[in-house]
Image (cartoon, rainbow, N blue to C red):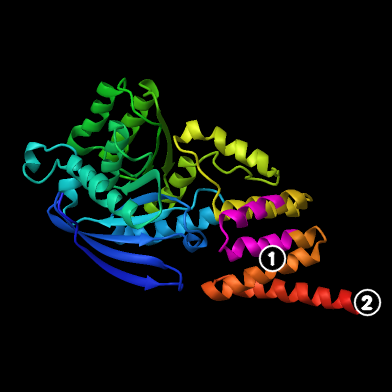
Amino acid sequence: MKSILLVLVFLLSSPAFAQYQRLTINSELLGEDVTVQISLPETYHHSDNFLYPVLVVLDGSTQFNHSAASVNFYSTYAVIPEMIVVGVSLKNRLMFYTQTEPEAFAGRAGKADILTRFLQDELLNLLNAQYRVAPYYVIAGHSLSGLYTSHLAVKGHSKFNAVISISPSLWWDEAVIVADYKKNHTTSIAKPMRWFISMASEPNEMPEAFERMLLALKHHSKSGLYHSYARFPDETHDSTPLIGLAKGLRAIFSGWNAVPGVDVMPMSALTTFYENKTKEFGYKFPLSVHQFNVYGLKAAYEDKPAWGIEILAKGTEAFPDSEILWDSLATAYSLNKNLPAALIASERALDLAIANDSIFIDEIKAQNSGLKAEKMKIDKN
């Protein structure tokens, strides 16, 4: 394969690394220029070696911004993993999002497998070469691109580990995808595939094909395919991507959060929890910045400050440049009545916050000032 031509546009959000990037791939496989938008996790610069899963969002020109925002919000609270979000915009949607070529669409449809080759051989290879990418890939699509992502889920043999299909056009070619699933449901797949499929308030053939697919999934289970679904009767075709993507992410990563409530765990239990998730997801997720932060702070505030200190200290070892974790470690030390250690951690957090132009700099300064005031009060006495 010849080299891919790139045009990079950097939108800098910190001196360490660009938060948002846009590039153009001159794809030999598709025969067109593909616009790609990339959102890196805000913690990307906190480590030199941590790998991030990827969420590919089709129809990126309209779906990228809200998708990146949802990933950022949910991952901040450890509901889902921190991910690199990649929006992909195609010019010829009908051609590449459809898997068959009905007579009425001769020469204009049926090239879905070529799109899969582009995504795997050009896009994912490029991402792996330029960014720290974990071998866990999620893809999301809506309407016609939702048909394509459904095709990936049903077919089963791709690099993608999870699929989100929002109001997908399953009616295409007389709902041939349902028939294909029934015909091939006994075919094994190499790794677990998680599929979320949803339907808004849609006319005629859209919900009919959706219900047919749900019946097929119910009566003809496929080994290794784990599906969930939702109906959004209050959403239209145009409004449903926002809630569909958000619900889809939570469904795909259902049970992934080790501490969803107020119950807390020590570091050893967290390690065991995610080791036990490896078979379920087909990938062993290491703890990210926000996981260390959420789990450590929860432990500290739920009267387990020693657990919190252990978790957050492990976090600063894995992410030595994370002002978030150093600041939270200072909080945990403070709750454990260890003011000297709290001040050391807080000073480190403040130095990093200034260097990284952190969005949390005001909170970090406030804690640092409070700890210094507390020390001055103690010294006077």
Circle on res. 345: 1
Could you tell me if the residues under marks 1 and 2 are in contact, i.e. CB atoms within 8 Å? no
Task: Tell me, yes or no, whether the highlighted magenta stretch contains residue 323.
Answer: yes
Q: Residue at x 6, y 41 (%)?
A: 106
Q: Residue 164 in the image: x percent, y percent?
A: 37, 43
Element assignment for label 2: loop
Q: Is residue 2 visible?
A: yes
Q: Residues within 10 Å of mark 2 (few under 14, many from 20)?
A: few
Q: Residue 161 at x, y = what percent?
A: 38, 39
Identify the residue at image location x=46%, y=59%. Answer: 41
- How packed mark 1 is, by other alpha carbons closer than 10 Å (few <14, some 14-19, many 20 or more), is many
Amino acid type, label 1: Ala
Does residue 359 sit above or below 218 in this rendering? below
Compared across the picture, whether 137 is left or right of 46 comes to: left
| Quarter holding residue 105 | top left
Q: Which residue is mark 2?
A: 381
Is 94 covered by the magenta stretch?
A: no
Q: Position of residue 87 (x, y in %)?
A: 32, 57
Residue type of the residue flagged with mark 2: Asn
Quarter-of-image position of residue 177: top left
- Where is residue 185, by image quadrant? top left
**Total numbered badges shown on the rendered structure:** 2
Q: Name the residue: 63% across, 73% down.
A: 350
In percent of the image, x 54 and y 74: which residue is there?
355
For the residues marked 1 and 2, what is the alpha-carbon distance in whole angstroms? 24 Å
Residues in magenta? 310-332
SS of the residue at dot 1? Answer: helix
359 vs 69, nearest the viewer: 359
